[in-house]
Each structure stands twice: as structure tokens, then as C-alpha cells.
């Protein structure tokens, strides 16, 4: 059913906001099981590329395939989880419990009449457990801290059993120790659940410690390769300055 | 109770409760989408529609319905296609609608009295047909919300995220706006155009102060809306107050209590 290997395939994609060329002929393949970091300076088009992949923006040129299918015909959107940049700008009045938020993603993939069966309830609980939020299920989402909300949103994406998660700077505003736990959790999701991860980040230590592939964007795709290649390449120096002390960990 | 013997009172209660319910349900979604003022905006447009109906010598209610529905769709499209903010789109369309009403009224120069009666509403003068239309509308709103409940909650929670989950957000936006337009036109009879927005915003805001989940917000909003309508009608009858004013003031009192209860949970035993 699915094209083997390639889960997300971006082929010669360009995108313009009005006349501003933001993405210039990007081609990028993300294979099943990959953990890819998408890096690049502010305004380099990372979020734009992510939105094109999710069908929120239409590229002016090129094609994007998800699981081998052109996104214009793609229907299994619940298989691709998305954690938007600044997901934590939440209305504190929003009347939903943590459980309701997590169930949202699951319910969206269902046909009418929609209700949560026993296996769905288990999926919700498992997802909450995976992000360490299982003791907060009945609490109001608006009353959670930013980092806690972020975990709940990840649980929401996980509950519908995605093949891939796309995270746009998920740890902005999250404290250091929570970040460490968070990336350990991503590692687990990637290894144990074999969920493909695309992580937009500015955090170079994450790139060197956790991810397996790196794509570096600046309107063009200026680098794409394994994280070892990235660490030894000129691009790292060019991006983060000659003084940046980059220590690569082998997996 | 003697009050219930009168046909006009029965019709007032029935239509008031039905419209109160639809306003309260829609209000929860509209407030959370930061579209609370759409009721206010559509009320202005409805004023233009009523004037147009009177001018063309067709049913003012029908004319207002058509104009309000078209304008609600226009507001949504304007926001969707051009990226104009929701409140800006509402502001533009509502002012244009009001201006239309003023120009028509002034040009024709004869029906000002009738036109202005729509501004204040008269729930005690509601006819059988209007009760039936209100009943049908309430059923449509309830069914739409029940059938699309999860999608509506999701879209309300996060528009973009809902889109990436395969939800037809544009269709839902339009449905919600059209239902609001129809509700506003019918609610005009209950509280008048000047106070329609209150019926949409205040009960929902009250529910949102106290609710910890979505269903609870809708239930509390409906309770506030219905109790305000009934209380307003009773005080209109027994205390000889204008029903519309009494309904809205009562709802405001409930809102103030809700704020107090949310601030000092110990007082009301909430949470
Ligand atoms: N809605 C918009 N309208 C017009 N231009 C936009 C819009 N959103 C983004 N841009 C422009 O597109 C370019 C890429 O923006 P994008 O948000 O993709 O950057 P990014 O790589 O995600 O940056 P950051 O690291 O700050 O999140 C920027 O130059 C930005 O000014
Ligand atoms: Mg970005």
C-alpha cells in the first residue's frame, strides 16, 4: 500500500508569500523511522515548509507526497501528527480537560457516530502515560503550565496512532530539565513506536545528541545528510560560527 | 399560574426558551473562536435587511433573513480569502448594513416607527408562525451541533490543527456563521436588535467562567440563557418591566455571580 521507504517526499517545492520567494526548489525525502532535524535561521522557511507538507499552504511549484500519495489526494491525515509552533498560546478559558484534548485527535479520524470505544480509551491513556501526564487527565487544559500543555498536545498527536510527528519548535519556553525529559521521550517514541519524527529546532545540542538526520534550510536546502556528516561538515561551522564547539555523539 | 393561561404568554415563553437555547449554544463556540461580536455585527446588518424589506414591501423578517445570511457568508469569506481579521470584517460589514438601513429609512421617510420597533423587540407580540420557525431553527442548531460536536470543538480549539486532522474547517465556519445569522434574525423579536448580541454573549460567557469541560460550558450557558429569558418574561408580566431589558439584565447578574464564583471558589463550592 505505502511506497516503501519514503514517508514524506518533497519534490522541487517552491513557495511564495506574494512576490517573496520563501522556499526555492526544495527536494527532501524523509524515510520511515527517520528522526530528522530541520534547522535554519529565523525566517528561513522552516515553518512554511512544514505547513506545505501538512497541506495548510499550497506550494507555487513542485509536489509533496505523504506515504506515497500526493497530498492533494491524501486523506489519512490522522496518520500525520502536528505540533505547531507556539501551540501554547491557549485561551485559558478553553473548557476542555486534558483527556478531552487528547481524545480530539482520535475522534477526528472517525466516521459518525463518533465515540470512544475501549481500545480508544486505552490509546488515550497510553499516550498520556508516554508523555508522563496520566495523573492530570481530569484537569482543565488552561490551568496547565506551558510545558505541561505541550506534552498534552503531543499526547493528542500520539493517540491517533500516527506514522509521523512533525514538531515545530516544541520546546520553546520549556525549562531545561523538562526539555531533557522531552527529548528522551521523543527518542523513545522514535525507537520503540517507530514513529518518524521531523523536528524543527534551533537547539544545536539536540541536533548533536538526539537526531539521526539533519536538513538545513535557508530558502534553499543548504544541507541534508546524516547527523555525523552534518557535524563534520562546513555547514555546521557556517551556521553556528567558528567558535561553536560541536560535540557529536554517535548513536 | 395565571400567567400561563394567555396564548401570547405561552408563545413568548416557548419561542424565548427555544431562541435562548440556540443563542446559548452558539455563543460558547463563537466566544472561544473570538467571534463574540459577530452577533452584534449581524444585528446591525439585520437592521438594514428589515429596512430593505419594508422599503420593497416584502416581509421584513424574510428580507432580513436573506441579508443576514448573505452577510454572514461574506464575513467568513472576507476573513478566509484576504486575511482580514474577524473583528475587522465584522466591523466593516455591520457598519455597511446599518448605513444601508439609515439611508433607506431616510429616503422613504415613512416607516421609521415600524423600523425602530425592531430595535427594541417585543416578545409578547410573537405570532404562531414565528414560534414554529423558532422551533424549527432550534432543532436545526441542536442537530448540527450534535452531529458535528467533535469537529466543532476541535475547530474551536485550534483552526489550523483541525485542518491538518482532515476536518473541513471552511465548511464548518460557514455553517456556524449562517446558523448565527438565522438566530440573530429570530432573536430580534425576543430582545430587539440592540440587545441580540447580549443573548449570544452573556450566557456563554457565564458558562465559560465555571466550566471545566466543554459539555459543562454548553449546559451552564443554556441554563443561564433559559433562566434569564423566563425570569425576564415573568418580571415583564408581574413588574411591568420591558421584557428585553429584564432578560439581559438578569443574564448580566448571573454573569457577575459566575465571575465571583470563579474568583472565590470557596463561596459557591465550585471545583
Ligand atoms: N503570513 C505570512 N505572510 C507573509 N510572509 C510570511 C508569512 N509568514 C511567514 N512569512 C515570511 O516567510 C519567511 C519564512 O517564514 P517561516 O515562518 O517559514 O520561517 P521559520 O524558518 O519558521 O522561522 P522561525 O525560526 O523564526 O520560526 C519569512 O521571511 C517570513 O517573513
Ligand atoms: Mg517557524
Image (cartoon, grey):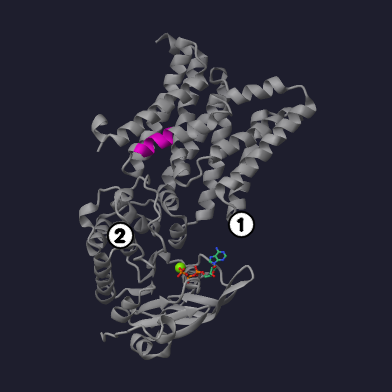
Q: Is residue A92 above or below residue B59?
A: below
Residue A28 numbered tag: none
Q: Do we see residue B30 in this rendering?
A: yes
Q: Residue at x 55, y 41 (%)?
A: B38
Determine the image quadrant of residue A108: bottom left
Q: Residue furthest left?
A: A135
- Label 2 CA crowd tier, 10 Å (few <14, some 14–19, many 20+): some
In the image, the segment drawn in magenta is B203-209
Q: Where residue B268 appears, x then y in whole percent?
A: 26, 30
Q: CA distance from mark 2 to mark 1?
A: 34 Å
For the N terminus of chain A, give its image quadrant. Answer: bottom left
Instruction: Judge: label 2 CB < 8 Å from ligand 1.
Output: no
Q: Residue at x 53, y 40 (%)?
A: B37
Q: Is residue B157 above or below residue B121?
A: below
Q: Is residue B217 left or right of residue B20?
A: left
Query: Is B205 covered by the magenta stretch?
Result: yes
Q: Residue at x 38, y 77 (%)?
A: A37
Q: Secondary structure at mark 2?
A: helix
Query: Is B264 covered by the magenta stretch?
Result: no
Q: What chain letter is assigned to the residue under label 1?
A: B
Residue B81 numbered tag: 1
Q: What chain letter is assigned to the residue under label 2?
A: A
Which residue is more in the foreground, B123 or A36? Answer: A36
Q: Which residue, given by chain and number where applicable, does mark 2 sit on?
A: A147
Q: Residue furthest front?
A: A243
For the C terminus of chain A, give its image quadrant. Answer: bottom left
Which residue is more in the foreground, B185 or B248? Answer: B248
Q: Residue at x 62, y 25 (%)?
A: B118
- Asked if labels 1 and 2 touch by Cβ distance under 8 angstroms, the answer is no
Amino acid at each position: 500500500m505505502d511506497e516503501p521507504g519514503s514517508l514524506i517526499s518533497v519534490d522541487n517545492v517552491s513557495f511564495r508569500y506574494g512576490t517573496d520567494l520563501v522556499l526555492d526548489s526544495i527536494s527532501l525525502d524523509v524515510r520511515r523511522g527517520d528522526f530528522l532535524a530541520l534547522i535554519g535561521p529565523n525566517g528561513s522557511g522552516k515553518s512554511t515548509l512544514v505547513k506545505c507538507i501538512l497541506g495548510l499552504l499550497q506550494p507555487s511549484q513542485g509536489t509533496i507526497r505523504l506515504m506515497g500519495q500526493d497530498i492533494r489526494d491524501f486523506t489519512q491525515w490522522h496518520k500525520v501528527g502536528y505540533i505547531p509552533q507556539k501551540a501554547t498560546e491557549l485561551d485559558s478559558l478553553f473548557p476542555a480537560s486534558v483527556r478531552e484534548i487528547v481524545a480530539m485527535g482520535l475522534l477526528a479520524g472517525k466516521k459518525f457516530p463518533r465515540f470512544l470505544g475501549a481500545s480508544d480509551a486505552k490509546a488515550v491513556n497510553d499516550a498520556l502515560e508516554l508523555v508522563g501526564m496520566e495523573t492530570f487527565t481530569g484537569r482543565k487544559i488552561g490551568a496547565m503550565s506551558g510545558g505541561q500543555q505541550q506534552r498534552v498536545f503531543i499526547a493528542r498527536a500520539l493517540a491517533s496512532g500516527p506514522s509521523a510527528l512533525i514538531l515545530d519548535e516544541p520546546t520553546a519556553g520549556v525549562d531545561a530539565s523538562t526539555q531533557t525529559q522531552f527529548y528522551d521521550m521523543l527518542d523513545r517514541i522514535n525507537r520503540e513506536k517507530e514513529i518518524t519524527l521531523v523536528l524543527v529546532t534551533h537547539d544545536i545540542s539536540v541536533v548533536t545528541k538526539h537526531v539521526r538526520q539533519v536538513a538545513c534550510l535557508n530558502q534553499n536546502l543548504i544541507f541534508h545528510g546524516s547527523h555525523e556528516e552534518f557535524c563534520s561538515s562546513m555547514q555546521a561551522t557556517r551556521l553556528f560560527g567558528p567558535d561553536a564547539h560541536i560535540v557529536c555523539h554517535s548513536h | 399560574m395565571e400567567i400561563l393561561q394567555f396564548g401570547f404568554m405561552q408563545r413568548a415563553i416557548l419561542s424565548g426558551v427555544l431562541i435562548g437555547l440556540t443563542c446559548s449554544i452558539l455563543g460558547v463556540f463563537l466566544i472561544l473562536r473570538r467571534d463574540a461580536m459577530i452577533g452584534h455585527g449581524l444585528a446591525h446588518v439585520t437592521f438594514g435587511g428589515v429596512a430593505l424589506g419594508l422599503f420593497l414591501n416584502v416581509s421584513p423578517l424574510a428580507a432580513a433573513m436573506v441579508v443576514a445570511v448573505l452577510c454572514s457568508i461574506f464575513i467568513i469569506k472576507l476573513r478566509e480569502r484576504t486575511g482580514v481579521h474577524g473583528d475587522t470584517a465584522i466591523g466593516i460589514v455591520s457598519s455597511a448594513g446599518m448605513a444601508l438601513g439609515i439611508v433607506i429609512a431616510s429616503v422613504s421617510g415613512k416607516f421609521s416607527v415600524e423600523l425602530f420597533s425592531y430595535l427594541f423587540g417585543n416578545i409578547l407580540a410573537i405570532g404562531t408562525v414565528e414560534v414554529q420557525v423558532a422551533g424549527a431553527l432550534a432543532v436545526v442548531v441542536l442537530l448540527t451541533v450534535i452531529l458535528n460536536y467533535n469537529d466543532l470543538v476541535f475547530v474551536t480549539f485550534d483552526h489550523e490543527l483541525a485542518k491538518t486532522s482532515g476536518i473541513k474547517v471552511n465548511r464548518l465556519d460557514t455553517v456556524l456563521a449562517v446558523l448565527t445569522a438565522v438566530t440573530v434574525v429570530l432573536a430580534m423579536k425576543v430582545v430587539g436588535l440592540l440587545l441580540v448580541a447580549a443573548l449570544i454573549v452573556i450566557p456563554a460567557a457565564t458558562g465559560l467562567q465555571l466550566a471545566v469541560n466543554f459539555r459543562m460550558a454548553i449546559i451552564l450557558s443554556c441554563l443561564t440563557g433559559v433562566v434569564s429569558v423566563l425570569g425576564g418574561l415573568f418580571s415583564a408580566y408581574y413588574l411591568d418591566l420591558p421584557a428585553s431589558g429584564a432578560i439581559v439584565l438578569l443574564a448580566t447578574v448571573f454573569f457577575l455571580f459566575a465571575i465571583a464564583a470563579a474568583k472565590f471558589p470557596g463561596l459557591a463550592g465550585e471545583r
